[in-house]
Amino acid sequence: MKRIYLSYCRKMRKEAVLMFLVPLSFCLLQGLAWHMLSTYKLYLWMIGKYGARAFMFINNLALAVNLIVIVAIILTFYLIGKKIDFKENMLSLILLLFLGFYIGDVIANLMYLLTEFPLTVDLVLSTLINTLLSERKFFIAFTGMAIGYIKSKL
C-alpha cells in the first residue's frame, strides 16, 4: 500500500511541475515577443521611413504572434490532458495552471514593464484581471486539457 502511494505522489509531482512550468514558460515567451514587437515598432517609428505601413505591419505581426500562442497553448495542453488523470486531480491541476499563468504574467510584466511602471498593488491586481479576463490563456489551456482528457477516455 505504501509503495502505491509513493508512486502516486511521484507521478503527481511530475504533473504538478508540468502544470506550473509550462504556463510560466508560455507567459515569459509571449512577454518577450511583445517586448520585441514594441522595440521594433519604436525603431520603425523613429526612422520615420514607413509611416502608417509600419503600424499595420506591426499589428499584423502582433495578431500572428497572438494566434500562434493560442494554437500552441491548445495543442500543448491537449497533449498534456491526454497523459494526466484530470478527473482525480482536478482541483490541484486547476490551481497550478492558474498560478503558472498568473506568476508568469507577473514576471513578464516585471521584466518588460518595470521601467515604465513600478511594482505596486495596481500592477499585481491588473495582472490578475488580465490573466483571467483579458487574455483568457487560463481558460484556453483548461479547455485544451479537458478535451485531451475526454478524447483519451473515449
Image: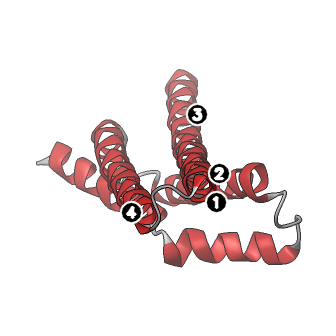
Q: Which of marks 3 and 4 is nearer the N terminus?
A: 3
Q: Earlier in the sequence, mark 3 or mark 1?
A: 3
Between the residue at mark 3 and the residue at mark 1, the CA separation in whole angstroms equals 20 Å
Outermost residue to the front: 49
Comparing labels 3 and 1, the label whose residue is closer to the camera: 1
The residue sitting at 51% across, 45% down in the picture is 26
User: Is the Cβ of the residue at disc 2 closer than 8 Å to that at disc 4?
Assistant: no
Q: Where residue 17 sits: x, y (%)? A: 58, 36
Q: Where residue 154 sits: x, y (%)? A: 10, 48
Q: For residue 57, what is the image quadrant?
A: bottom left
Q: Is mark 4 on a helix, strand or loop?
A: helix
The residue sitting at 24% across, 55% down in the picture is 147
Residue at image mark 1: 102
Q: Can residue 105 be seen?
A: yes
The residue sitting at 51% across, 76% down in the picture is 134
Between 60 and 74, the residue placed more toward the observer is 60
User: Is the Cβ of the residue at disc 2 closer than 8 Å to that at disc 1?
Assistant: yes
Q: Where residue 39 sits: x, y (%)? A: 62, 50
Residue at image mark 4: 53
Q: Can residue 142 be seen?
A: no
Between 139 and 36, the residue placed more toward the observer is 36
> Which amino acid, by three-letter code, is at mark 3?
Arg
Between 37 and 23, the residue placed more toward the observer is 37
Between the residue at mark 1 and the residue at mark 4, the CA separation in whole angstroms equals 34 Å
Residue at image mark 3: 13
Query: Which colour assignment does the render follow?
Result: secondary structure
Outermost residue to the top: 3
> Which amino acid, by three-letter code, is at mark 2?
Gly
